[in-house]
Image (cartoon, rainbow, N blue to C red):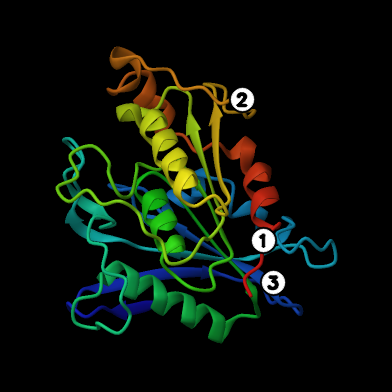
Amino acid sequence: MSFKDSTSYQRGACLISEKFTKQLPLLVWLHPSLAPRNAIVLTGLLEATTTADLANDKSRLGYHLLIVSGRSTTHFYPFPDAKGLGWDNWYRNYDRSDSKKINVDVQTIDHFIKTAKSVASVDPKRVYMSGWSNGAAMAVEYGLNTPNISAVAAYSAPDPYRDIDDPCEQEPSPPYLTPFKILYNQCDVLGICTTGKAFISELLSRYPKLIAEFNVTDALQSSVMNPPECINSTLLCKGILVGGLNHVRWPFLLNQQFFGFLKKYTSS
């Protein structure tokens, strides 16, 4: 699928949809920065499109998978991720009535979700967001600022509002208390396990009715730690050593944790 956004940038997306006879959930996945949308092959999410229970209904197994492409843009991350393919979660205009100034990534995701609903048998009460790294930050921010997103389950998201080097830090004031879950590595790049924990804790302190889960996995990425603990090692976890190596692996063994969270929630 293709779409030209309001800046005339050509956008693309891929909809994986079997010819299901029943309405099934739609899972929207956003790739990491500096990686194309075909990074989806590293996640195990393609293989699960016909078997996962996202509808909380064993008679409706499977889901439609919408993989949206980002664009070449500025990221406020350290080199080499300062510019390139990805998502602009720093420009936070989600005003759909402001067609000239709305974040074009938001405009693009909106368009492709609408298109997916028009061509596939989508359960309108089960539209879910997911993503990896920069794509995870965009998925969480999008979910908190968009109606009719049922829930978000994302991996290794930098703080979408006040991350390292953010030139315009903001206190989150989400208009929608969309349930979300973020899974981090105990040792994650740039210390985002620690900053992610702070992001979620601060949101929960101001919005006690919000459902927001902070989960942590170890280097094996085979289980969720209880209690969730980050490793605060500048040498290992803030550079490209252990933290970086963990960050570039999707925890496919924990996909069922994501599915189990998402299927609990529907939109009105």
Report the mark closest to the observer, 2 or 3. Answer: 2
Seen from the viewer's position, the closer of residues 14 and 93 is 93
- Name the residue carrying label 1: 265
Left or right of residue 250, residue 109 in this image = left
Quadrant, the C terminus: bottom right
Q: Amino acid at mark 2?
A: Met
How crowded is the residue under tag 2: few (<14 C-alpha within 10 Å), some, or many (20+)? some
Against 133, is 54 above or below? below
Numbered disc total: 3
Place of residue 141 in the rendered image (x, y in percent of width and height, measured from the top left): 39, 57
Against 263, is 197 above or below? above
For mark 1, give the secondary structure. Answer: loop
Report the mark closest to the observer, 1 or 3. Answer: 1
For mark 3, give the secondary structure. Answer: strand
- Name the residue carrying label 2: 225
Q: Amino acid at mark 3?
A: Leu
Between marks 1 and 2, how big is the CA–CA gap? 23 Å
Please identify the quarter of the rendering in which residue 56 is found. bottom right
Quadrant, the N terminus: bottom left
Name the residue at 48% across, 34% down: 184
- Name the residue carrying label 3: 24
Name the residue at 81% across, 63% down: 57
Seen from the viewer's position, the closer of residues 215 and 207 is 207
Seen from the viewer's position, the closer of residues 118 and 57 is 57
Marks 1 and 2, the one that precedes in the sequence: 2
Name the residue at 56% across, 26% down: 228
Place of residue 146 in the rendered image (x, y in percent of width and height, measured from the top left): 44, 70
